[in-house]
Image: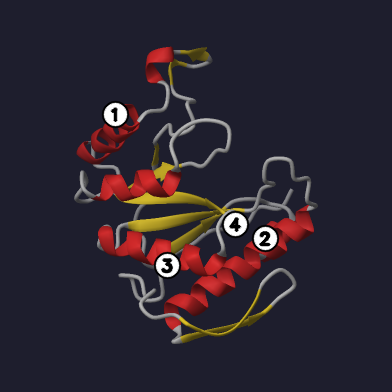
Amino acid sequence: MTIVPITSTELDAVEVSWFSALCSDDFQYLGVPDGTLRSSWAHCSNIVKKAEAQGFRNILCPSSYQVGQDTLSFVAGCALITEKINLLAAVRCGEMQPIMLARTIATLDHMLEGRLTVNIISSDFPGEKADSAFRYQRSREVVEILKQAWTQDEINYQGQVYNFSGLTTDPAKPYQTGGPLLYFGGYSPAALEL
């Protein structure tokens, strides 16, 4: 296994994020499911509000196909009920057309006034069994398209998965210059390259 050191000159402390149980996987006791803690707007938004009140700087809003709340809709709703905490929205690459995703994320970034971070996911879709190399290539292309949409006036992209030419990016510019901070997970060679 490869250990990848993560460093950031802007951070002067360890970042510990909380987890909002959008995927109906919240338990009061480890391994003991509690039906009253199933994913709902009321329950999950309460987790976000409590995490903010306790001083957490970031909270992961995960994504799942099986159960739970829609991540991006949930994050939009949290813009109105939070003031300080960052929302780390999990985004499965390829689930939404990249240019539409760029616009959606830019809009959320404005709603949150720069308190948006994005967790890039490179997993399969329901019924899909794509090899790892393809999934990471798709994610790489989505990230490159997002960066073009957020930093340039026009999208011109020729990839293995996506191809766009001469598309305007106005008004898909995020609140944060260059776009929200992107988080990645994984330790395979393709993940490390991404």
Q: Which residue is depicted at the point 30% across and 57% down?
A: 115
Q: Is residue 18 left or right of residue 90?
A: left
- For disc 4, the marked residue is 93
- For disc 1, the marked residue is 42
- For disc 3, the marked residue is 103
Q: Which residue is depicted at the point 78% across and 59% down?
A: 133
- The kind of residue tagged 3 is Arg
- Could one spot residue 14 in this view of the protein? no
| 10 Å crowding of disc 1: few (<14), some (14-19), many (20+) | few
- Separation (CA) of disc 4 from disc 1: 28 Å
**Element carrying mark 4:** loop
Between 43 and 9, the one lying in front of the other is 43
**Residue 192: mark in rendering:** 2
Q: Which residue is depicted at the point 44% across and 24% down?
A: 26
- The kind of residue tagged 4 is Cys
In the rendered image, residue 143, in percent from the top left (x then y), is placed at 56, 68
